[in-house]
Amino acid sequence: MKAENGGTIVNAFGSVGEAECWGQRAPWCDYYGEVDGHTLGIAAFDHPDNEDYPTYWHVRDYGSLATNNLYFLGGKLFQKGQTIRYRHRLYFHEGDTGATDVAGKYQDYIHPPFVTLAQQ
């Protein structure tokens, strides 16, 4: 999915390409391109409960797609026993960002359905 092979990076705010998406904050980022004659992609979703939401994106034309708050925020110093937890989701799809409704799938992730059991 390299950009030189037709790969495209898109973020939640409509920025396109490494130059517009790298180092920028967004709730999600998608990378799609042609694979064996099919348009396939992978989107990564950041959860609103994560520290420093929305995340900074480390995306590159050579195919890298990663969240990276630690780098862009100047690093974090952890004390012994201290932890941090991040929640993310990967969404693999067929089609480009719009055709697959990546934005809608992100909304499904952050607003899951509420289910109750009905007794008869």
Image (cartoon, rainbow, N blue to C red):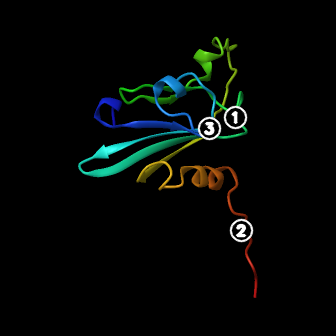
Distance (Cα) linking label 3 and label 1: 19 Å
The total of numbered circles placed on residues is 3
Image quadrant in which the C terminus is located: bottom right
Q: Is residue 95 left or right of residue 110?
A: left
Of 75 and 31, nearer the camera is 31
Image height check: is 19 above or below 79? below
User: Which dot marks residue 13?
Assistant: 3
Identified at 38% across, 30% down, the residue is 63
State which mark lies toward you, 2 or 3. 3
User: Which dot marks residue 113?
Assistant: none
Distance (Cα) linking label 1 and label 2: 24 Å
The picture places residue 97, in percent across and down from the top left corner, at: 48, 48
Kind of residue at disc 3: Phe
Of mark 3 and mark 1, the one earlier in the sequence is 3
Image height check: is 101 above or below 27? below
Give the labeled residue for mark 2: 115
Q: Is residue 9 left or right of residue 117?
A: left
Find the residue positioned furthest to the left: 36
Kind of residue at disc 2: Val
The picture places residue 111, in percent across and down from the top left corner, at: 70, 54
Identified at 64% across, 11% down, the residue is 74
State which mark lies toward you, 3 or 1. 3
Identified at 62% across, 38% down, the residue is 13
Q: Disc 1 vs disc 2: Cβ atoms closer than 8 Å?
A: no
Q: Residues within 10 Å of mark 3 (few under 14, many from 20)?
A: some
Kind of residue at disc 1: Asn
Q: Residues within 10 Å of mark 2 (few under 14, many from 20)?
A: few
Give the labeled residue for mark 1: 50
Of mark 1 and mark 2, the one earlier in the sequence is 1
Q: Residues within 10 Å of mark 1 (few under 14, many from 20)?
A: some
The picture places residue 43, in percent across and down from the top left corner, at: 49, 43
Identified at 64% across, 38% down, the residue is 27
